Amino acid sequence: MTVYDVAGLQPAARAVAAAAAAICVRHLDGDAITIVAHGSAVKGGYLAGCSDIDLRLYVTPGRLTAEGQLPLELALRIYQDVARLDPRPFRYAQLAAHAVGSNSGGGLIPGAYQIIYGDACVPLATSAELCHAAHAALGELDAEGYALRLGAHLLGGGYPHAQELRWLCTDVWPALYHLLVCDGGDPLAVWRLPKPDAIARTAADSEAGSAIRQFWRALNTHYATGETLPTALAALEAGIAFLRAAGRWYGTREHQA
């Protein structure tokens, strides 16, 4: 019987992560080399109803398409079974497949991931890489462009606010960690922080610090009170306000990668 090592995960994530890993191993039929959990399911600081259980699947290269993806038919079968799991208090298990030995998904943060299955080496991030990425990301941050695209998407119909908020989170949280790195924080130590601890590293009376706290409060309100349209829009506004503040903060300093 295959044993899935989930001891290093948050208790609420262990059963779902193990079940999702078992599904992947079964469908990949010997081509699953390593399965790794990372993010808030390992570090903590997850937001109930919002945060995902992030899993990376390292598979034999021949199982992927030329574009580096699992074939659609295989992805559908895995998705069908994973979708039946009850992930609560997490939102869902999010899977990403990579060829073993590649760095296509970027390096993992030492001390902030857990190998659930397998024991192959996984790519690790370095301080220099994280520092370079932070300066590149904030230097290219286009909060106004993001805001315009968001407005266009919302007006395009279909009531996309729920998905837009989740996409916004994938920009806000990295921007927070990039800001802390560019502000002189040790890159590896910064990226090991759970979100509440990362927020606490910002100055509460600064524009960016105030904005990220407002975003965190708005997210908590949204997911704790039934995910209504007004709370979603408030969270979207707060997230854009933080991206704007982060861009202005970076633009007023002379940073060197």
Image (cartoon, rainbow, N blue to C red):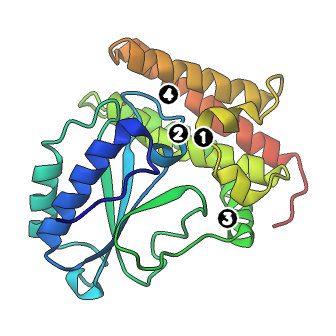
Closer to the eye: label 2 or 4? 2
In the picture shown, does residue 54 fall above or below 206?
below
Of residue 70 and residue 197, the one placed in the foreground of this image is 197
Based on the displayed image, in which of its 4 quarters is residue 231 positioned?
top left
Residues at circles 4 and 3 in contact by the CB criterion of under 8 Å? no
Percent of width and height locating residue 112: 56, 55
Mark 2 lies on residue? 44
Residue on which disc 3 sits: 133
Comparing marks 3 and 2, which lies closer to the viewer?
2
Marks 3 and 1, how far apart in space? 19 Å
Give the amino acid at mark 1: Pro
Q: Which is more foreground, mark 4 or mark 1?
A: 1
Mark 2 and 1 residues: CB-CB less than 8 Å, in contact? yes
Q: Residue furthest bottom?
A: 62
Question: Of marks 3 and 1, which one's residue comes earlier in the chain?
Answer: 3
- When the figure is inspected, residue 88 is found, relative to residue 68, above or below; the finding is above
Q: Which mark is residue 236?
A: 4
Element carrying mark 1: loop
The alpha-carbon separation of the residues under discs 3 and 2 comes to 23 Å
Q: For numbered disc 4, what is the local secondary structure? A: helix
Q: Position of residue 80 (x, y in %)?
A: 10, 51
Residue wearing tag 1: 194
Which residue is more in the foreground, 154 or 14?
Answer: 14
Badge 3 amino acid:
Ala
Sequence order check: which comes first, mark 3 or mark 2? 2
